[in-house]
Amino acid sequence: MLCKHCQRSFGAPHSTAYNRLHGGRTEFDAVVALLAEGVSQAVIARARGLSPSTVSHWIGRAAKHSRAFEEMRLVVDEPTELQLDDLRSGEAGREQRTWVFNALEVGPRLWLRSRVGARTFRNTLVFARAVRQRIRRLPALRVPPRFGLPAGARRLGSRSTLR
């Protein structure tokens, strides 16, 4: 195939999960489909006659390309209800707590963003900016007071804050 822009040749599966895949596309698709149905990696490997490491590698490859596709294509026009959560995780008794920030559009149950890190103003702001990039039209975003922000910084929807 030729690139329409630079007229250089490239293979059709270039920049896809199939690029340099050792094994058939149909086998790769079957492995990913079985995993999506909830079948364990060990059972997939046994049933398809593949090495467990091959199955693990293929699943990692599919996940990487799925994330890249999501980063490029997932945009919400105008969310009806946006839910932002911060969840504390980690072992009980540990001083250093890890937080998981999540953004969910409630109606269609669409996960817009997730971020893992300390509960700091910087992490909260980075997370809010990343959520804002996924939304085309959004009025001022009101954030609950407990969401890792100082008391005076509850309005994140202004363009100067989120850019």
Image (cartoon, rainbow, N blue to C red):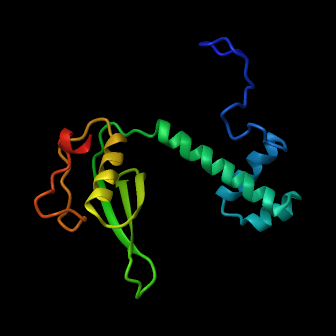
Answer whether residue 109 is visible to the viewer in this image: no
Q: Viewed as shown, does residue 119 lie left or right of 8?
A: left
Name the residue at 28% across, 51% down: 81
Residue 9, given in percent of the width and then of the height, sits at 73, 17
Q: Nearer the viewer, residue 76 or 63?
A: 63
For the C terminus, the image quarter is top left
The answer to whether 114 appears left or right of 29 in the picture is left
Say above or below: 19 vs 122. Answer: above
**Percent x, y for residue 24?**
83, 42
Q: What is the number of callouts on the image?
A: 0
Residue visible at 25% across and 44% down in the picture: 162
Asked whether residue 87 is in view, the answer is: yes
Q: Residue furthest right?
A: 49
Q: Residue at the location (85% across, 62% down)?
A: 47
Q: Quadrant of the N terminus?
A: top right
User: Could you tell whether 137 is left or right of 118 in the image?
Assistant: left
Residue that protrudes farthest toward the bottom in the picture: 93
Rendered image quadrant of residue 13: top right
Give percent across and percent down for residue 118.
36, 67
Q: Quadrant of residue 52?
A: bottom right
In the rendering, at what x and y percent does residue 125 appear? 28, 53
Decide: is 20 above or below 151. Answer: above
